[in-house]
Image: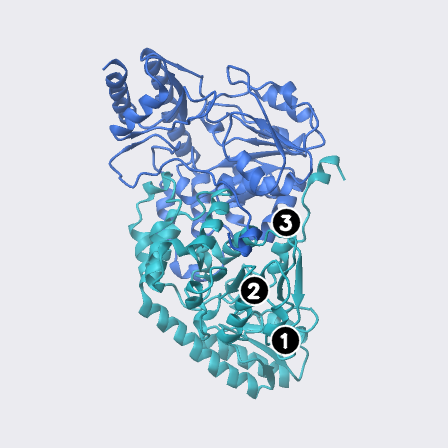
Chain colours: A cyan, B blue
């Protein structure tokens, strides 16, 4: 190793779900939405004057921020936007978890939390879920430098009642509690109303799942004006202009069409419930997912075997060779037709 | 202050140049390009299938990376892309300046360097420029945790010969040297060929100036495969998908039209040289800028007075009320027509 390399921050990077280049596959591995974004987004691309690209974007992304504020009935000063919820969460970690005490999050949860903690040098302690993958609020009632809860949780799909979440927040007035609601639109109940009651609560959302815009990278957070102010100070110290002009406009257009949004979400919920029944018939054990994916364990063959057999048939789902969850597959809810193809393949794999 | 706020990282954020909402102004304050991007960018917006937005973008942005690699004749593994060069530089600082020794950069330079150092807790020492704003390579031949040089420098516009840059790199085999070439396309000579000679050299570029795409947020860096690999590891530990699909395609389209690029850059150079003469006639003292801005000091009235008088006339330039540079204005090179309006206003202000 050269001497200059001693000064380099070395990390083990997060490995995202496979993005097959081949488009002739059924892609149920990264929780993408099977439906296109709101039609107004197409209108933005058509009407956008490309000569505006020469100018820097609005640094505060006000058109987008205002559309989110209006949608949720909160003040614009309570909204932080970023390049996907990963950007939002990363800045939240960097800004709000700046103590020597460990932050707490479940042992089974979004696999980026420990990665951010590592890259920013934040001490952390993972808290085991119960054996049914539910959260025990009492486990979060000890000294800590912050708490992060994904609700519904990933990859389990399990939703914790808002009373459980509030119990955790109430017990932690001295640290920031982040609730990552990436999947909340698919059936859970949001804890958003609590941001007016608890100044130290941050609720994080994304356009990547329910709004069909993973490819555009938009995430946002809602919290007290004070919390959002601190995050913006750090954000403006890293990159004043993160969200490009086209994306800001597309994001605002999506937020304004609520009926399209609800329709698309409801279709996914209907397909999910139908799929749960079908998977149960195929002998899968599963959680009662409130997300756009199903966390399901095949009982007749190993999860790894089923994962590989599906891949051979060009059907991609997600599998982790890790303790506790190695018996499960995470299957994104696609269209009805995609799910039917999946079920046919599963029948063949499990009964063949 | 609440107890949870004690855990918050508190920074003084960078204040970007004013972005007036009023479009009826002459905006010469943030070094934007007066000409639109390559026409192929329009074609991308028209032909882009918006249903692709539901899918995550290619995490390695390969279409864009490959177009840059091809343009410069380097390998794709030597290219890092980010959301503007601010994103690229921020990740470079976080990754490559992870020691207890201070990093070095000029006292007068891009005002974000000390902001990143502060936010990431990197010790730094600023090195005074000579009185003519040139760099003395010998000042960088002491123990350090890294070196950052903007070449041409901002806001001075002064270009340092590649021999001076190589002198600094040669003296620093044990730390990483970043050369920020945001403005190199407007007349300077790049040190890019040196990346094959020095594994610890990182050259940073942007689409925001010469490629008329500040609004789309694209920056990139070129260096050894090893250096780029370390940066990608950190990048993938913060946000796997930073650059959205539309932006990746627009960036590649721009990179492929070299004749449009050269034409647009040459127009700006011609206007700059004409403007230098005109400003000299108006009694300005100035550096020999090799950028798309002119760093000029009015001799008859104070810079602050001229700045405010221009603003009253809806002409925005940049002024810093800071030691050493408080006698100067930084004037972005606009169209010939915009510059003529500026000169008429300056005549009025200086001779009125």
Q: Position of residue B27 (x, y in %)?
A: 32, 32
**Nearer the observer, A190 or A286:** A190
Which of labels 1 and 2 is toward the front?
Answer: 2
Residue under label 3, please give it: B233
Rendered image quadrant of residue B192: top right
The residue marked by circle 1 belongs to what chain?
Answer: A
The label shown at residue A240 is none
> Does residue B105 lie above or below A5 as drawn?
above
Rendered image quadrant of residue B211: top left
Q: Position of residue B139 (x, y in %)?
A: 64, 20
Closer to the chain start, of discs 1 and 2, is 2
Residue extending furthest toward the front: B1
The residue marked by circle 3 belongs to what chain?
Answer: B
The residue marked by circle 2 belongs to what chain?
Answer: A
**Nearer the observer, A201 or A285:** A201
* Residue A87 appears left or right of B261: right
| Residue appearing at x 58%, y 49% in the figure | B235
Q: Can the viewer see residue A297 in this picture?
A: yes
Residue under label 2, please give it: A172
| Residue appearing at x 27%, y 22% in the figure | B340
CB under 8 Å between discs 1 and 2: no
Which of labels 3 and 2 is toward the front?
Answer: 2
Residue under label 1, please give it: A328
Helix, strand or loop for disc 3: helix
- Please state, as top left, top right, bottom left or bottom right, where the C terminus of chain A lies in the image: bottom right
């Amino acid at each position: 190793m050269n001497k200059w390399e001693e000064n380099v921050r070395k990390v083990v990077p997060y490995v995202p779900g496979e993005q097959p280049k081949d488009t002739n596959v059924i892609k149920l591995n990264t929780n993408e939405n099977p439906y296109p974004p709101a039609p107004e987004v197409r209108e933005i691309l058509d009407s956008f004057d490309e000569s505006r690209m020469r100018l820097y974007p609005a640094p505060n992304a006000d058109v987008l921020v205002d559309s989110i504020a209006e949608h949720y009935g909160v003040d614009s000063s309570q909204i932080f936007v970023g390049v996907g919820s990963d950007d939002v969460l990363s800045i939240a970690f960097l800004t709000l978890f700046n103590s020597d005490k460990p932050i707490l999050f479940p042992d089974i949860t979004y696999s980026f939390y420990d990665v951010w903690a590592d890259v920013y040098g934040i001490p952390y302690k993972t808290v085991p879920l119960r054996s049914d993958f539910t959260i025990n609020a009492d486990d979060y009632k000890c000294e800590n430098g912050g708490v992060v809860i994904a609700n519904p949780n990933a990859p389990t799909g399990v939703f914790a009642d808002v009373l459980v979440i509030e119990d955790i927040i109430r017990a932690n007035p001295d640290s920031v509690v982040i609730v990552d609601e990436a999947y909340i639109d698919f059936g859970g109940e949001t804890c958003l109303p609590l941001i007016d009651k608890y100044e130290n609560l941050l609720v994080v959302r994304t356009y990547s799942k329910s709004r069909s815009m993973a490819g555009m990278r938009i995430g946002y957070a809602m919290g007290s004006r004070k919390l959002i102010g601190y995050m913006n100070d750090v954000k403006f110290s890293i990159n004043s202009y993160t969200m490009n002009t086209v994306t800001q406009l597309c994001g605002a257009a999506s937020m304004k069409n609520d009926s399209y949004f609800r329709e698309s979400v409801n279709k996914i919920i209907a397909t999910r419930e139908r799929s749960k029944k079908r998977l149960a018939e195929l002998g899968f054990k599963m959680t009662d997912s409130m997300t756009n994916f199903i966390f399901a364990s095949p009982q007749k063959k190993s999860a790894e075997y089923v994962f590989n057999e599906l891949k051979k048939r060009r059907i991609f789902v997600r599998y982790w060779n890790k303790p506790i969850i190695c018996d499960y597959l995470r299957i994104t809810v696609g269209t009805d037709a995609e799910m039917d193809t999946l079920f046919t393949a599963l029948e063949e794999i499990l009964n063949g």
